[in-house]
Image: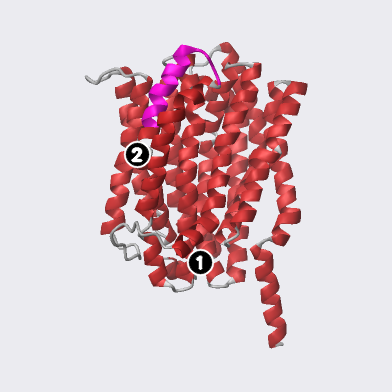
């Protein structure tokens, strides 16, 4: 599919590839926030329990998305190199790898979920609610990990419409089931927090079914056979060359939320709920950007594999422009409408005050965050997973965590919120000034200049 569209103008190609992914990501953000809106009606303890569970959910998605990014980048690059046999072999690993990751998290949840919640609180109601939610999420983690691997394999061919439909099927299911299972409407049992988890798992299972059906029955440019559990070392190494840094990059978000929960809980337990609300709300801004990243990743990987540096540069520049517009719009919305947005969650007076301040201050970081995501995506697409990981490691660990501790002590929660802004700005400066010069992009440029001199 990329072959058919490779000669389109850069912005038109980006939009064609990105819009379906942006829509699917926005749908994902919608049903993530719907869970919290309904759960908030059960009280502050219920919302805190679900907010505390977020790092585990992010970690599951990190392994699925990160490995999927490696799979997708490899398929796209090999399509650019016209190595179709290698492409088909790689695609047959999607389901087996997803199952292995899912089983890992089922075992992890069985042994560690309770200890995880006891690290944050000794309130039995919060711990009980958190376990009701998280035990089901980890037990059925395979429903999301397999779906993500299949989705990324499809995206690698340039088909962005099918993944949108796959996500939409699960999202609609989840949104419909949430109020029915949480509050016991239309004859369903009132299951509270457990109902929210069941709705999430069923929604993920529906997406998985749609994904597998499409993977095997639709013409997606891949010759997909039976799942291949006889892994070849070279293919796994090629997948993980980009996939492992991508997993670590995605997992940083989990560790970030985990540690920030500890930091803000020192100031106020309500701040944990505020942080959880922020991370779910910011998805409405970040998900379109991640949609652009998903759309351009196979394009950039294709042109990198085909050694078309000019096309690669043009795609990257246009993607930065599009991302900047999205992020600046998000900042404006958060700053202007913060009070109305926070009120959706039935907040206490303290939650309202902290929530409005958090949304307005943290949203200032969006512009730099968008640029950092585009650079990280470019590095992934050009088989430079290490540099991509460094960008994320800077913005989601190295800079923000020490800053949040230091500024938190000096300025309270206001300092914690400001640490997001400073971290994104410093990461952009470091990336633009130092990391680009050491990346595969720089090496590609030097190679092209060297070839030009030979032909003069």
Q: CA distance from mark 2 to mark 1?
A: 30 Å
Secondary structure type for disc 1: helix
Compared with residue 352, is residue 237 higher up or lower down, i.e. above or below?
below
Query: Is residue 59 positioned above or below 432 on the image?
Result: above
Residue at 44% over, 22% down: 130
Please say if 56 is above or below 301.
Answer: above
Residue 401, quarter of the rendered image: top right
Residue that mark 2 sits on: 204
Q: Is residue 133 magenta?
A: yes
- For image coordinates 65% across by 32% down, the residue present is 362
Query: Overall secondary structure of the magenta stretch?
Result: helix
User: How dense is the environment of label 2, judged by Cα within 10 Å: few (below 14), some, or many (20 and up)?
Assistant: many
Location of the C terminus (image quadrant): bottom right
Query: Residue most toward the left?
Result: 187
Question: For residue 357: magenta?
Answer: no
Specify start and end residues of the magenta stretch as a single range.
120-137
Residue 218's spot in the image, x, y percent?
28, 59
Find residue 289 and name its label: none
Residue highlighted by disc 1 = 302
In the rendered image, residue 414, in percent from the top left (x then y), is placed at 70, 24
Give the farthest residue toward the right.
410
Q: Which of the 4 image quadrants contains residue 140?
A: top left
Counting labels gives: 2
In this rendering, the answer to whether 228 lies above or below 170 is below
Q: Is residue 425 left or right of residue 298?
A: right
């Amino acid at each position: 599919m990329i072959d058919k569209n490779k000669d389109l103008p850069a912005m038109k190609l980006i939009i064609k590839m990105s819009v379906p992914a942006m829509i699917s990501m926005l749908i994902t953000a919608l049903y993530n926030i719907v869970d919290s809106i309904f759960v908030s009606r059960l009280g502050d303890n219920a919302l805190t329990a679900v907010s505390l569970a977020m790092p585990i959910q992010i970690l599951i998605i990190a392994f699925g998305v990160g490995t999927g990014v490696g799979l997708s980048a490899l398929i796209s690059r090999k399509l650019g190199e016209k190595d179709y046999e290698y492409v088909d072999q790689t695609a047959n690993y999607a389901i087996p790898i997803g199952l292995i990751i899912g089983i890992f998290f089922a075992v992890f949840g069985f042994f560690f979920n309770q200890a995880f919640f006891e690290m944050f609180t000794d309130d039995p109601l919060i711990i009980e609610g958190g376990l009701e939610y998280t035990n089901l999420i980890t037990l059925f983690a395979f429903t999301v990990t397999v779906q993500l691997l299949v989705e990324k394999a499809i995206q690698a061919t340039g088909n962005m419409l099918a993944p949108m439909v796959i996500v939409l099927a699960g999202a609609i299911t989840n949104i419909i089931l949430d109020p029915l299972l949480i509050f016991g409407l239309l004859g369903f049992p009132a299951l509270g927090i457990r109902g929210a988890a069941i709705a999430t798992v069923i929604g993920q299972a529906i997406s998985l079914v749609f994904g597998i059906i499409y993977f095997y029955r639709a013409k997606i440019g891949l010759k997909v056979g039976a799942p291949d559990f006889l892994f070849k070392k070279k293919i796994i190494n090629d997948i993980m060359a980009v996939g492992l840094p991508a997993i670590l990059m995605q997992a940083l978000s989990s560790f970030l939320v985990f540690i920030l929960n500890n930091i803000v809980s020192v100031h106020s337990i309500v701040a944990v709920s505020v942080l959880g609300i922020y991370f779910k709300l910011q998805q409405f801004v970040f998900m379109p950007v991640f949609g652009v990243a998903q759309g351009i990743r196979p394009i950039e990987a294709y042109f990198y594999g085909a050694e078309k540096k000019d096309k690669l540069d043009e795609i990257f520049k246009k993607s930065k422009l599009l991302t900047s517009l999205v992020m600046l719009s998000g900042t404006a919305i958060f700053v202007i409408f913060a009070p109305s947005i926070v009120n959706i969650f039935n907040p206490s007076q303290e939650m309202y005050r902290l929530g409005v301040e958090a949304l307005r201050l943290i949203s200032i970081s969006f512009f730099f965050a968008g640029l950092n995501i585009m650079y990280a995506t470019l590095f992934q697409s050009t088989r430079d997973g290490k540099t991509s990981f460094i960008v994320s490691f800077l913005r989601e660990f190295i800079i923000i965590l020490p800053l949040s501790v230091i500024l938190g002590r000096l300025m309270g929660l206001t300092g914690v919120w400001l640490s997001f802004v400073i971290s994104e700005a410093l990461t952009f400066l470091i990336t633009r000034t130092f990391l680009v010069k050491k990346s595969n992009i720089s090496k590609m440029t030097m190679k092209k200049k060297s070839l030009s001199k030979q032909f003069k």
